[in-house]
Amino acid sequence: MDEGRDGTPPAGSGPPIAGELPPPQQAYGRYAQHFLGCWACRDVDRRCDKGEQLWREYEAAGAAAGRQMSDT
């Protein structure tokens, strides 16, 4: 006998969602999203100014997080 479901669960009853990602992860996400859609970024013989800027922002966010960790 198929018991089925009691209906859809009420909104907000799912597992808790983590807060905002740390800045280095946010920066890497922006870079990765751009990289996956940019042919110039994926081509060894070409360069992409936007991709390079996003990568520098990721490196800077990582360095800032490292400095913050070493200050504590």
Image: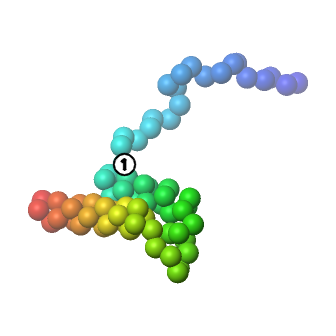
Q: Quadrant of the C terminus?
A: bottom left
The extreme right residue here reads 1
Query: Image point 85% across, 25% down: which residue?
Result: 2
Vertical relation: 1 (above or below) 40: above
Whole-percent x, y for residue 4 in the image: 78, 23
Q: Is residue 18 above or below residue 46?
A: above
**Which residue, given by chain and number where applicable, does mark 1 sit on?**
21
Residue 39, visible in the rendered structure = yes
Q: Quadrant of residue 27?
A: bottom left
Location of residue 17 with respect to 30 vertically, above or below: above
Residue 18 placement (x, y as % from top left): 40, 41
Residue sitting nearer the eye, 61 or 18 = 61
Element on which disc 1 rests: loop
Q: Nearer the viewer, residue 16 or 42?
A: 42
Name which residue type carries label 1. Leu
Residue under the image location 45 percent in, 35 percent down: 16
The location of residue 53, given as percent across then percent down, is 35, 64
